Image (tube, grey):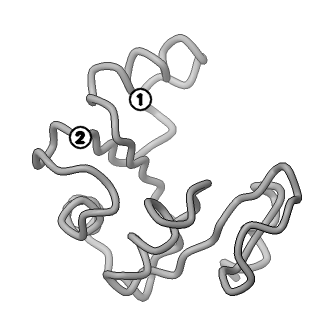
Amino acid sequence: MKIGLISNIYEEKIHACLQEAGLGGAVFDVVVGVDAIGEMKPHPGVFKYALHKLNVQPEETIFVGDDVEVDYKGAESVGIHALLINRTKEKVLSDPKTITDLREILPRIY
């Protein structure tokens, strides 16, 4: 299993946040920031770049995000299985696959 992180901030800032959280570089196989290709989510190129760096196919991939337009629809636009994490448990949109806790991902992987 490979794990990546895609964010609309610069990679230097992402790595600084990871260090501050005690996660360092060992958690993610790839980190993609806005400076990787000069585009932001939901641009398809951002997701395709991450897939390429991970050497995986869209249909083998699950993307979890907290924004319907930027994350969920962006990932789906390139064929990635998308999940919307909604920690507030408020109804955001009726059609996305929604989880309320990251632990809910594991049953969907196997």
Residue shown at 43% from the left, 60% from the top:
70
- Residue 25's mark? 1
Secondary element at image label 2: loop
Across and down, in percent, residue 28 comes to 44, 43
Residue shown at 66% from the left, 78% from the top:
109
Which comes sooner in the sequence, label 2 or label 1? 1
Above/below status of 20 relative to 45: above
- Residue 40's mark? none
Number of numbered discs? 2
Above/below status of 56 relative to 67: below
Residue shown at 65% from the left, 66% from the top:
84
Above/below status of 56 relative to 101: below
Q: CA distance from mark 2 to mark 1?
A: 18 Å
Q: In what quadrant of the picture does the C terminus appear?
A: bottom right
Disc 1 crowd, CA 10 A, few/some/many (<14, 14-19, 20+): few
- Residue 34's mark? 2
Along the viewing direction, whichever of 76 and 20 lies nearer the viewer: 76
